[in-house]
Image (cartoon, rainbow, N blue to C red):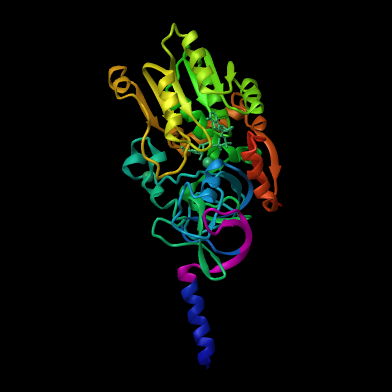
Amino acid sequence: MVGTARLRGLMRDMTDTIKGTTTMKTRTAVIREAPGKWDIVECDVEEPRQGELLVKMVASGLCHSDDHLCTGDIPVAMYPMAGGHEGAGIVEQVGPNTPGWEVGDHVVMSFLPGCGKCRWCASGQQNLCDLGATLLAGSRADGSYRMTLDGAPVGQMCGIATFSEHALISVDSAVKVDKDLPLDKACLVGCGVGTGWGSAVNSAQVYPGHTVIIMGIGGIGINAVQGAAHAGASNVIAVDPVEFKREKAMELGATHAFKNMEEATAFAQSVTNGQGADSAIVTVGVVKGEHVGEAFAAIRKGGTVVVTGLGDLTEVGIPVSLGELTLFQKRIQGSLFGESSPTRDILMLLEMYRKGRLKLDELVTRTYTLDTINEGYADMHAGKNLRGVLIHSS
Ligand SMILES: NC(=O)c1ccc[n+]([C@@H]2O[C@H](COP(=O)([O-])OP(=O)(O)OC[C@H]3O[C@@H](n4cnc5c(N)ncnc54)[C@H](O)[C@@H]3O)[C@@H](O)[C@H]2O)c1
Ligand SMILES: [Zn+2]
Ligand SMILES: [Zn+2]
């Protein structure tokens, strides 16, 4: 005969199986409040439910967007929030009834999930998938959480949390990649490379012979440089106040580099018969309305400003001439993940890397461990890195 306590235990086990059970601990970096810094903690992670994967992270890029959580420029709906959204790893456990996935599969995480069914996914705009609605709450689409700290729910940045040694993710955020690709480089394609490259190729629609200005040469801007060069621009003009960034831009495809927009704009006009650049792509770390205004003043009639960088999300207002907007028919185009579709373009960009047509190895300036993540972000602010990458311990 089963005792009452044992019966209660069995019932609790059964309920846990239905709800999802905590099976393991993982170290991760969380932000508890803004402004704040990354705090290294040990969280509990559930085992995967249907449609989910437990991933052992190999590497995570240190994108500026996670830093916006620390400053509060991007307000999140849940604290603590486990950070990181540019990662790659290896599948360690597959949820029940989750076809197409196996233990040992290699994955690059997409910071934007794709359901494949909504209006946007069906229109080739997977970057705008409706599943993006809960990304800054760090929850699943139904509002539930998969990580806890001392029993309280923890959000996962973009639903993935690539700063975690292990993370439970939805298959909608995972792109399976070939096992021979180096994951410590491939991780960059999950955000920075796809965003920058697509900002030039998809959003600015750079054509052969164009003159393009890229404003801000970090992990995003350097890939807009690669994209613009790849699309055949005659003048790829990099702008950054940091000399090291300008040097790197010249190594990776820029034809000219300037320390401010005034010089870049004058140069663009000098090579276009006074008309101005065909497009200007804003990839500054903390974007303000004035940056967009400077880019707007640099482009020709019918030209395009692409705004990819983020700043204080509550800021309103861009100082642009309404006359120029209408009469010069200029465009200001926002760009999320460079208007790339994750499941198509992550694989396409990795194939370009394999063929030597896209540089990834050269993007990584320094690597860090989970424990030195705040150093990594200090180096980003000091302008020392094109991209810093966190390498998880094996
Ligand atoms: N739209 C998207 O989908 C998307 C995706 C990822 C990142 N982002 C955003 O893109 C921006 C860039 O990210 P990152 O990781 O490359 O940042 P980063 O800090 O590595 O690079 C930003 C660069 O801008 C330069 N800069 C600062 N002020 C400048 C100015 N006035 N003129 C020219 N250059 C200037 C800095 O020196 C630095 O080199 C961030 O705001 C980030 O949040 C957007
Ligand atoms: Zn990013
Ligand atoms: Zn969708």
Give x and y (percent) for residue 59.
64, 46
Give x and y (percent) for residue 119.
31, 42
Q: Which one is in front, 160 or 222?
A: 222
Q: Is residue 183 left or right of residue 138?
A: right
Asked if residue 244 is positioned above or below residue 101 in the image, the reply reads above
Give x and y (percent) for residue 135.
44, 51
Q: How many marks?
A: 0
Residue 2 forms part of the magenta stretch = no
Q: Is residue 40 visible?
A: yes
At 36% from the left and 47% from the top, the residue drawn is: 130
At 56% from the left and 49% from the top, the residue drawn is: 84
Q: Which one is in front, 390 or 23?
A: 390
Q: Which one is in front, 344 or 73?
A: 73
At 59% from the left and 38% from the top, the residue drawn is: 188
State the image quarter where residue 207 is shown: top left
Asked if residue 313 is positioned above or below residue 326 in the image, the reply reads below
Give x and y (percent) for residue 199.
46, 29
Q: In this view, does 110 lie to the left or right of 29?
A: left
At 48% from the left and 11% from the top, the residue drawn is: 209
Q: Magenta stretch: give its range.
A: 17-42
Asked if residue 260 is positioned above or below residue 64 in the image, the reply reads above
Residue 21 forms part of the magenta stretch = yes
Q: Which residue lies furthest to the top in this view?
A: 273
